[in-house]
Amino acid sequence: MPSQEFSVIIEPGRKKSFYWRDIWRFKGLFFYLAWRDILVRYKQTAIGVLWSVIRPLLTIVVFTLVFNKLGNFPSEGAVPYAIMVCAGMLPWQYFSSAFSDSANSLVANSNLLTKVYFPRIIVPASNVIVCLIDFLISFVILIGLYFYYQYTPDWRIVFVPVFLLLATITAMGFGLFIAALNVKYRDFRYVIPFIVQFGLYISPVGFSSSVVFSNPSIPQFLKYLYALNPMVGVIDGFRWAMLGGSVDLHLPVFFASVAVSILFLFIGIWYFRRMEKSFADVI
């Protein structure tokens, strides 16, 4: 048989153009990392996955006592205050966990990054999925409060997945950006808890956004800054969907928060991809 000659052509940019296709090729690794984190998340704990319920439940109790009983913060419409806080706490708990875990994910999986090629974005993305499962487990708290207070949501609850997607976009954007920084500057492992704690107090978890916008003593520029907090739109959207007609959605504030979330998603992906090629050398 006549001999055949083969040529290997190396073109610049080929790796970049096939990056997103490689994510699909490595989907098995994505599911493996997610399943591994699910198995070890509550390993050797006495009550296991019940921590997904107990942690937000205790926070809801504390916020209800502090903001409602002691601070006299009002609820929204006829909604019981505990339900209002729960509808804000669940998306916040999901965001804070997903952001923290994804931001620390590359450092936590440093051995894997130095051994084999795969799209590194799979690592923080798998952490977000694990936190999503925690969110679904924690959702039983809200269902229990519905029964306890005999409160019935309306048809808008079907939009919960939309706002859950928005919370995921927000967590991924900030998580990817900080994860890339955390590889080179390990100081960010100390900054991340501060960001989460600070964000809790400037987000409408224990109070309603209407308290901010209806308060004449708050300067207008602070209200604009408040509206740019992406979690304001996420939490207000969750409450609008979960609490029925008693809650209004401030559309200008919501769209401003959505714009910031989408912007940071693109910034996070851009910076992560820019720094990705140096992860194995730096980490």
Image (cartoon, rainbow, N blue to C red):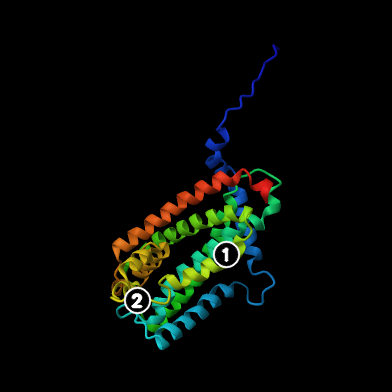
Residue type, mark 1 in image:
Val
> Residue, x 67% and y 16% (percent of image)?
5
Q: Dot 2 surroundings within 10 Å: few (below 14), some, or many (20 or more)?
A: few
Q: In this orientation, which residue lies closer to the viewer: 181 or 110?
A: 181
Quadrant hosting residue 235: bottom left
Q: In this orientation, which residue lies closer to the viewer: 76 or 181?
A: 181
Quadrant hosting residue 74: bottom left
Given this view, does label 2 or label 1 mark the residue nearer the observer?
1
> Pointer 2: what residue?
152
> Residue, x 42% and y 64% (percent of image)?
231
Q: Position of residue 128 (x, y in %)?
A: 54, 59
Q: Position of residue 170 (x, y in %)?
A: 46, 58
Q: In the image as oriented, which residue stretches furthest toward the top?
A: 2
Number of marks drawn: 2
Q: Circle 2 sits in a helix, a strand or a loop, which is it?
A: loop
Q: State the quadrant of the N terminus.
A: top right
> Pointer 1: what residue?
191
